[in-house]
Image (cartoon, grey):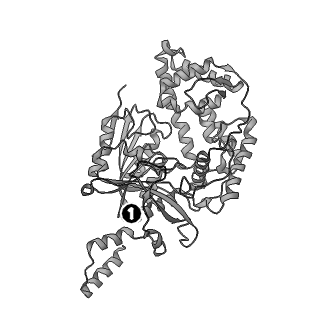
Amino acid sequence: MPTARKAALVAAGLTLGLCVPTAQATAVEAHRSPAPALDRYYDQHPTWHRCDNVGASHLRCATVKVPLDYKRPAGPTLRMEISRLRTSVPGKRRGVLLSNPGGPGSGGLDPSGLTEVMPKSVRDRYDIVGFDPRGTGASSPLNCGLTNKELDWPRAYRPASFRKDTASARGFAAKCVARDRARLPYLTTRNTARDMDVIRAVLGEKRISYLGLSYGTYLGAVYTQMFPARSDRVVLDSSVDPNRFGRGTYQAMAEGVEPAFRDWTRLVARRDRTYHLGDTPAEVRATFFRLIARADRTPLKYNGSDLDFEDRAVTGADIRDSLRSMFFFDPYQAARDVVSLGKARATRPDPPSDEPVDTLEANFQALHWAIVCADNSASWPRDPARYRHDAIRDGARLPLYGDFTSNITPCAFWPRGAEPATRVNNTVGALILQNQWDSQTPAASGLAMHRALRGSRLVQVEGGRDHGVYGIPGTPACATNAVNTYLVTGRLPSHDITCRTRP
């Protein structure tokens, strides 16, 4: 409660000789909403039931309602599905730990991936809570009626195809507007953070702890900015730059993959007797880009089973897009893939796919762009010529992926979001985890999150190659232990930590 109001209530209680029981006071505090008009959402009492085809048998699900627009609580509502895995040790229970696996566009109703890597000491202290964010999965999903070809984003810049790509981006946005214009401006991270606060109140908690991965780190950071007093123990694994979200998130990927690629050329050059791709980093790089140029001239028929494009025509852009994560995640598998692709024969381009659209992928793509476009509308130019210019510039500056991340997307034609971008800058305590060679959320982004959350501590994993730190095989014990200690005791490390992986 605001201080003045609380003082007035205390004074009234003394005058009337009344005493409010502690449990009742706690319930009032837990369910307090930011505005009286929102009380009906904060005071919900959901019915829990066994989840349908989700998670373990002891996971329970429930449905809550949230307003589409929190400024119009009496307006349209959304259905939001949440799950809860109760701790088996009530005496040790601290509260709830909310989780988000990333995206945006990914569902998070099943938290079993998280609980499987948590030690009992952590599970004993929390009810683990998952949820499908608004617009995805079982939570009023967004469906734009997209075709397989329209789901192919982002795309490499090609002068010959830019006009067609622009038309496709415009068509993607137009389909979403035609089907769901009223909802699009409100499918944002800020509103998902507000939904999280409704979940907190519905569960009867004063504060929530949180563990988010990738985009989930941005969602967690926005929650700490909007609800700092409601944030308990916060773990952010593989962070995006919270003050660059939008177009900058993509461009950071292109910036992050270049050092990972340089490290890959160094590792492979040391093993030239195995891979024969060159005995210096410069020679390995030249071999790779010769392969790219060849596949862009005439697609290759790839028969391996390691990559997403098994037994289909593969272009140089396909290779760059698919291997960009392998360079840091599994560098030697990437080397084997390059060797195999180098032996592949030329083939004709594949005809357009007539396979049925995967509804989960269609929902993911639609909501992904809805959030990325609406969260920071100002970061996306409206003039297609600007994208052409930036894609050419960044393709030369960041040749592995720069033309992808600066090329045109549906955001050029997307409706403006309902609110400006969130500026994250607070002193909420948090533990930030970051791998050195992660190119999805590069090290610079983790440092930016650390600067924005001034009460945080940073755990950097030197030599870490995955997108994700906690619970990943090979993660050093010092990183894992820092998370578990914080979640169990609430103690952040006294200083930032650098952990080292084994070679």
Label 1 crowd (10 A; few <14 / some 14-19 / many >=20): many
Q: Quick one: quadrant of the N terminus?
A: bottom left
> In the rendering, at what x and y percent does residue 229 appear?
37, 63
Q: Quick one: quadrant of the C terminus?
A: top left
Q: How many marks?
A: 1
> In the rendering, at what x and y percent does residue 463 appear?
40, 31
> In the rendering, at what x and y percent does residue 73 appear?
53, 71
Q: Tag 1: residue type?
A: Leu
Extreme-bottom residue of the structure:
16
Determine whether 112 is above or below 463 in the image.
below
- State the SS at label 1: loop
Decide if residue 484 is on the left or right side of residue 361. left
Extreme-top residue of the structure:
273
Frontmost residue, 120 versus 234: 120
Say which residue appears at 69% left-offset and 49% top-offset. Answer: 172
The answer to whether any part of residue 172 appears in the image is yes
Decide if residue 422 is on the left or right side of residue 456. right
Say which residue appears at 29% left-offset and 57% top-offset. Answer: 94
Frontmost residue, 317 versus 380: 317
Determine whether 297 is above or below 397 in the image.
above
Q: Quadrant of residue 352?
A: top right
Say which residue appears at 74% left-offset and 37% top-offset. Answer: 161
Task: List the residue tagged with mark 1.
Answer: 203
Frontmost residue, 228 versus 214: 214
The answer to whether any part of residue 495 appears in the image is no
> In the rendering, at what x and y percent does residue 20 appear?
27, 78
